[in-house]
Image: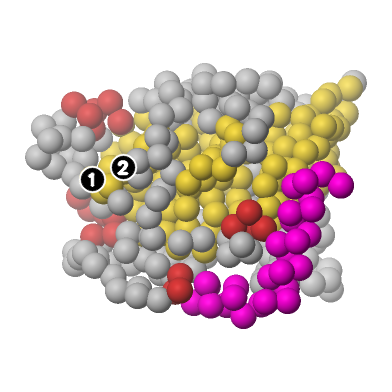
Amino acid sequence: MARRGVEYLRSRYWLQTHWWVSLLLLSSLLAGCDRTGPLGFREGSPLDDLPDWIHPILDSGVRPDWSADGKRLVYLDALVGNAYELELATGASRSLTSHFPHHGFTRVRYLANGDLLLCGPSISAEEDVEGAGDRWHSELFFLNIVGEGGAQPLQEPCFEGPAASRLNMRIAWTRSDYPEEILFARSEIWTGRIVLDDGRAQLVDRQRLVGREDFYYLAFLETQDFRPPNDQELLFTAYAYKGGEVMGVDLDTGLVTNYSQDWGYDEAEGVFPEGKTIAVEREADTFTAVPVGDIDIWELALDGSGKATRLTYFTDYAGFGANNPVVSPDGKKMVFGLRIKGGDHGNARGMLLYDLEAARQADSGPFAESGGETAQR
């Protein structure tokens, strides 16, 4: 057995026979959770007073992703719903999944060849089966974006969001036992390649990268993005680990790096194209395993310093936040959602476009010397 496999069995056996240590460590993560900073002190909606560099583009829609040319977005019409494509120049949307039967989709991402990687339930919500039709019991699908056929199952489960390389047909995903199991539940990140043969998709070269034992079983994992420009590192989130940390794992060496370096909730979202920073969902000063919901968007450095710049201030308004940021291929724009506090994780009441170039040139705002908020923990 490989050394890593032996270490895995030893760590799992030790924790199972010393389960109280896991509980003690987890309790330490939940302790001292005083919150600081003003929240919800403004009435109304963030849409009432947007800065010049932010404007709405859709009244509804969740979980967007950019096309390689930066001219289109794919998104979902619900947290478990149909996939659509928006042409930014015209504002016209077209459905990508309404022409075939399915049980809804929870994610949609462009693949390197322009086709789509989908994640969604494999069992109808109408069936009397535990987890049928919900977001926690999904699997991966391939969809030809120009064909008339349906989505092809890739025979892999999909916990939350998968990652898709911009350079080739490599993808990454998470296998998880959540929510049926918690303490010693499986949570593993895998990679593989999609190959096409006469229109049929197959997932090959499956490889396990990292698992919960690497975090003493204190984390649940979710893939996010391959890190540009060479895609040799996979960026992911370690939920509940120190509140939630943005991590990276080297695809060659297996080395895991913590980029958040803080004790608040960070969730990895869209990486910037130069690979030096990443947009994250952050709930500052939160030390609990599950965020309260006061989430804004920050830009986090991927150099290990933990330095981050706050990009949105939507939590200034009671009941609102910002989420699911994705950065355009040229790094000039970002699309994100208007989050409603108290709703399902990932919810959005419409999508907005953030002009990063305009914000960087503004006399005030997140990138001005006299404005914004920078944290280094």
Residue 75: quadrant of the picture: top right
Magenta stretch contains residue 38: no
- Residue under label 2: 307
Does residue 265 sit above or below 235 in this rendering? below
Along the viewing direction, whichever of 123 and 289 lies nearer the viewer: 289
Q: Is residue 226 or residue 146 the one in the foreground?
A: 226
In the rendered structure, which amino acid carries the disc numbered 2? Answer: Lys
Residue located at (61% from left, 62% from top): 216
Name the spot of residue 63 as percent of width and height, x first: 53, 46
* Numbered disc 2: secondary structure: strand
Residue reaching furthest bottom?
A: 20
- Which residue does the image show at 18% across and 26% down from the upper left? 361
| Front residue of this view, candidates 203 and 264 | 264
What residue is rendered at 45% in x and 74% in y? 28
Q: Which residue is mark 1?
A: 374
Q: What span is in magenta? A: 1-27
> Is residue 44 something that shows in the picture?
no
Q: Is 302 left or right of 241, judged from the image as shown? A: left
Residue 179: % across, % down: 68, 69
